């Protein structure tokens, strides 16, 4: 049986991506007519790596940056979300191997400044890392949000 791929291998595997295609029929109601990029995992990671200490980005800002890069109307939300998750686990894997410069995945938030429970260590770990960088985290219902996150959004 083949050895499962590491997170870093998954991150570097492009599987024919990026690719630009027409917005699929089932998504046209939400996104309208036009083109959509399905990014490569490493492209998502590259955007995440540009976020400096003290700054933040949301998955929607990553999608906007990648749509602009590829000259498309939108960037696929599903694959972008999956690739953010892969980048986070690859970063932790690299950290455990002693690498010093890893993707600061904890600075990438969900829509509305919400912390991502799917990250390594869950919301607790992301909260700890963000608070170390000076962000204030508040609970809203069952979710945790960075207070005034809009003020810390990075301009790409």
Image (cartoon, rainbow, N blue to C red):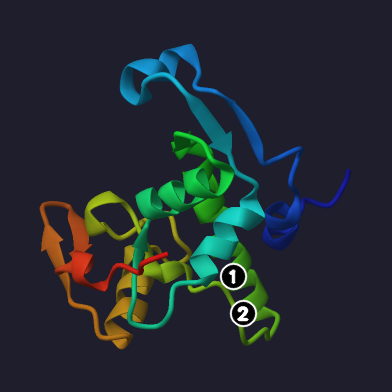
How many residues crowd around disc 2 within 10 Å: few (fewer than 14), some, or many (20 or more)? some
Q: Position of residue 45 (x, y in %)?
A: 58, 61
Distance (Cα) linking label 1 and label 2? 6 Å
Residue 109, above or below 98: above
Residue on which the image places disc 1: 91
- Mark drawn on residue 13: none
How many residues crowd around disc 1 within 10 Å: few (fewer than 14), some, or many (20 or more)? many
Q: Farthest front residue?
A: 71
Residue on which the image places disc 2: 95
Q: Nearer the viewer, residue 52 or 4?
A: 52
Name the residue located 51 percent from the left edge and 54 percent from the top edge: 85
Q: Nearer the viewer, residue 59 or 33?
A: 33
Marks 1/2 in contact by CB < 8 Å: the verdict is yes
Q: Position of residue 154 (x, y in %)?
A: 35, 69
Q: Position of residue 92 (x, y in %)?
A: 58, 71
Name the residue located 58 percent from the left edge and 43 percent from the top edge: 70
Residue 121, above or below 111: below
Q: In which quadrant of the rendered image does the N terminus lie?
A: top right
Horizontal side of 29 relative to 23 (left or right) equals left
Residue 107, above or below 54: above
């Amino acid at each position: 049986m083949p050895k499962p791929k590491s997170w870093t291998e998954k991150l570097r595997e492009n599987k024919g991506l990026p690719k630009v295609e027409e917005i699929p029929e089932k998504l046209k109601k939400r996104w309208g007519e036009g083109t959509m990029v399905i990014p490569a995992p490493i492209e998502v990671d590259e955007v995440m790596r540009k976020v400096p200490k003290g700054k933040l980005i949301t998955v929607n800002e990553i999608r906007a940056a990648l749509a602009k890069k590829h000259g498309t109307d939108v960037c696929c939300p599903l694959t972008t979300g999956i690739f953010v998750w892969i980048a986070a686990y690859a970063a932790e894997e690299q950290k455990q191997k002693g690498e010093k410069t890893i993707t600061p995945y904890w600075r990438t938030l969900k829509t509305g400044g919400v912390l991502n429970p799917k990250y390594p260590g869950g919301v607790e770990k992301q909260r700890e890392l963000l608070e170390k960088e000076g962000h204030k985290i508040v609970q809203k219902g069952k979710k945790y949000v960075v207070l005034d996150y809009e003020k810390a959004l990075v301009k790409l």
